[in-house]
Amino acid sequence: SNRSDTITFFYKQLDRLRAAKRTFYFTQGQHDYDDPPWLSAHPSAVHMHKEVIDFGEFRMYGLDWQPFGKLQEELAEIPKSCNMLICHQVWGNWMGEIAAPQGSFEQIPGHIRYVHTGDLHSWKLETKKNADGLKMQVLSCGATTQQTIIEPSEHHYALLYPDGRWEKRKLDSRVMIDSSLLTQESDVEVFMAELEPTLAEADQKAAAMELPAEMYKPYLRVSYAHKLPDVPRRVEKAVAGRALLHFKELIPEEKVEAYKAAKKVEKGVAVTPISVLPEVVDKEEKPGVYELTERLLLATDKEMEFAKW
């Protein structure tokens, strides 16, 4: 959910676009969704949901994030004159079933030949097929900043030309430093010896990009073996607040082996959430709660099941 400082910062950037006589169009994703939209309070932000915008050879149609079922209904309502969809969805083609996708590219109407979608936190431009089996370009620009330490450290935006060309442009974002895996004391000594010049180089990169003060400190991720427990203390002392630290301690080898051995043990009767549900919820006393809980526990796609309910 959005915090006030995020919205305040965003409004200041919209003021800059307004001063430059540039229009800002937006659709909502699932994590910033609200009614009315957060950005609707700003005079120069235009909500694109279910609106049509012409640009060169493109007739664009905007769509806010939609749950499963509702998405399919909204896709069917896109005017046939539109050839580009601007949206923010979890697509099964890219995210797989584990992310509870709301739809697939094959459900997009045949007259749509270009899709610009949010949600995927990395750059991806691919040719996919729509509902009519026709080719369409699908683009994800990715996140503008790292949302987790394992995401790509480089970020981009797309510049779209009236003739249909996409141009990949790099965003200036926080510098990322990733240590090699420290497995021996000698690895730690080499890493510590190189730490000062590494931080100095990160400072030079930040200065060259003219990053704002709040983004000047680099990310520093240090991965080390379990048998080297003193690494975080030593690194924190040496860094002295000049970087945002993330430590990854590897699982001890004996635990890995024990886990592998445990998997080989013959399984007994499984205790699952569904097996203990009657002990937690009285089916006679709260039939509605019991039914919904049971459906969600058994569902492979919980979001879809909840939408049906």
Image (tube, rainbow, N blue to C red):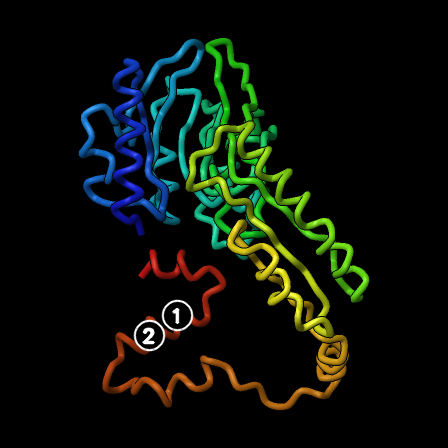
Is residue 139 something one can see in this rendering? no
Please state if 138 lies on the left or on the right of 213 as rendered: right
Please state if 102 lies on the left or on the right of 181 as rendered: left
Query: Which of these two is toward me, 118 or 91?
Result: 118
Residue 156 in the image, given as x and y percentages of width and height: 53, 30
Which residue is depicted at the point 54% across and 19% down?
Answer: 166
Q: Which mark, by number, is residue 295?
A: 1
Please state if 32 lies on the left or on the right of 90 as rendered: left
Distance (Cα) linking label 1 and label 2: 6 Å
Residue 60 in the image, given as x and y percentages of width and height: 38, 21
At mark 2, the secondary structure is: helix
Query: Which of these two is toward me, 84 or 193?
Result: 193
Q: Amino acid at mark 2?
A: Glu
Give the answer, above or below, for where 156 lies relative to 183.
Answer: above
Is residue 64 something one can see in this rendering? yes
Give the answer, above or below, for where 113 lies relative to 223.
Answer: above
Residue 73 in the image, given as x and y percentages of width and height: 34, 40
Please rate how many residues cluster around mark 1, counting C-alpha atoms within 10 Å: few if below 14, some from 14 to 19, many from 20: some
User: Considering the image in quadrants, where does the C terminus appear?
Assistant: bottom left
Residue 125 in the image, given as x and y percentages of width and height: 59, 30
**Label tally:** 2
Q: Which mark, by number, is residue 291?
A: 2
At mark 1, the secondary structure is: helix
Please state if 4 lies on the left or on the right of 293 as rendered: left
Q: Which mark, by number, is residue 67?
A: none
Q: Amino acid at mark 1?
A: Arg
Which residue is depicted at the point 28% across and 49% down?
Answer: 3
Give the answer, above or below, for where 124 lies relative to 19.
Answer: below
Marks 1 & 2, CB-CB < 8 Å contact:
yes
Please rate how many residues cluster around mark 2, counting C-alpha atoms within 10 Å: few if below 14, some from 14 to 19, many from 20: some
Which residue is depicted at the point 42% across and 9% down?
Answer: 56
- Tell me which corner region of the image, top left, top right, bottom left or bottom right, holds residue 232: bottom right
